Amino acid sequence: MAEILEIARQFDLSSEAIDAKPCGSGLINDTYLITTASEEEPNYILQRINHSIFTDVDLLQENMVKITEHIRKRLQQAGAKDIDRRTLTVIPTKDGKLYYYDGESYWRVTIAIRDSFTHEQATPEMAYRTGRAFGEFHAYFIGDDIPQLGETIPDFHNMSARLQQLRDAVKADKVGRLAKAQPIVDEFLSRAEEMTLAERLYAEGKLPKRISHCDTKVNNILFDADDNLLCVIDLDTTMPGFVLSDFGDFIRTAGNTGLEDDTDLSRVGLNMDVFRAFTKGYIETAAPMLTEVEKKLLPFGAKLLTYMTAVRFLTDYLKGDVYFKTQYPEHNWQRTLAQRQLLKSLDEHTAEMDAYIASL
Ligand code: GN1
Ligand code: MG
């Protein structure tokens, strides 16, 4: 870890970096907790940016500063307490740059938020509070002072584009995995029309794009020791998108009774209590902004994000595991099966989800 410490020391830290440990469970970047010498000064999060995915690191980091500063301003306007624990703070290098390039990798640093915790699932109470906070997050990005953000990954949550990537991977069958995957490929492609609804509605002017986080999986959220939401992290994909993305990705992860990659599919399914609690919280704070179409489509958002993630895992499986980090050879296949199982459960709960939304 000496090398990692040396990199941390390139940044403008308020106390000397003395220890580095890997942390986090993200599938894209590598993350380290940097401990500093002073008890009073913060610790830091150092990340190696996955440069093959985020090719424009300048844009990525400029977005990040714009987003965090805007959130800070809104928190101040709302008279929030503990603002330093409610938003990320980007730390520049000693020579004032937003990232450090060591000749091979790109690195960045943020302040580690003290006494914060991440979870892989949520209780209904946590889901309710998170729902309220997401409504607020979306509402922060309304007004005439909102920052202009670039698209760090073009077409990131564009379902039509994701399906095209699947078709391309099928055609190439680069690593010879198609034979095994074909039945599931066919099943997914048979739902293409249904799942590209949001893009069609957008093209017809019936569904708006708003600044969305686009990666609201539950482990991208920091809670305090009492399970109050502190802040949403992993801002790399915050860009114009549908509210369905953020609503859907939270349900996909926090509302799953199993894990994203569960090896026991009988554990996977929708936790309806989490769905209800999150939806209630979200609608409470987002109601003034949401259109009727958006509100009605929220259950579709949960299905869409589950389907989209399944399609992405399957595509990566067919391409030979080039995008998501994997822990074992068939990991992306297992992820595909687990997401497919969750989608089935969401399908089965459609009427129940719709009735709940209508009741609010
Ligand atoms: C990735 O970075 P992380 O692990 O929070 C991915 C998301 C997927 C998620 C699936 C930039 O998120 O889009 O939904 O894995 N991020 C990117 O777990 O592709
Ligand atoms: Mg993450």
Image (cartoon, rainbow, N blue to C red):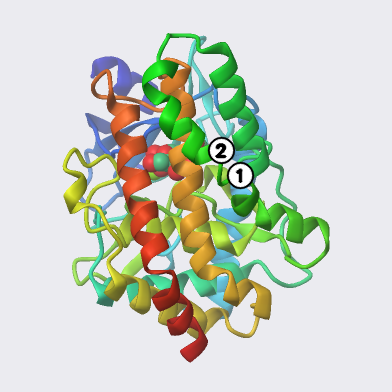
Residue 349 drawn at (x, y percent):
37, 69
Residue 28 drawn at (x, y percent):
42, 31
For the residue carrying disc 2, how many other residues have a C-alpha within 10 Å: few (<14), some (14-19), or many (20+)? some
| Disc 2 to disc 1: CB gap under 8 Å | yes
Residue type indicated by callout 1: Ala
Does residue 281 appear to the left or right of 228 in the view shown?
right
82 versus 160 height, above or below: below
Residue 341 drawn at (x, y percent):
32, 48
Farthest residue in the bottom direction?
Answer: 359
Of 191 and 131, nearer the camera is 191
Which quadrant holds residue 329?
top left
Q: Which mark is residue 292?
A: none
Q: Circle 2 — which element? A: helix
Q: Is mark 2 within 8 Å of ligand 1?
A: no
Which quadrant holds residue 198?
bottom right
Residue type indicated by callout 2: Leu
**Where in the image, quadrant-wise, is ligand 2 located?**
top left
Of 192 and 72, nearer the camera is 192
Does residue 330 appear to the left or right of 78 in the view shown?
left
Residue 322 visible? The answer is no
Residue sitting at 25 percent across and 17 percent down?
2
Q: Circle 1 — which element? A: helix
Q: Which mark is residue 192?
A: 1
The residue carrying mark 2 is 189
Residue sitting at 61 percent across and 44 percent down?
192
Farthest residue in the right direction?
Answer: 204
Residue 346 drawn at (x, y percent):
39, 61
213 versus 96 height, above or below: below
Of 94 and 268, nearer the camera is 268
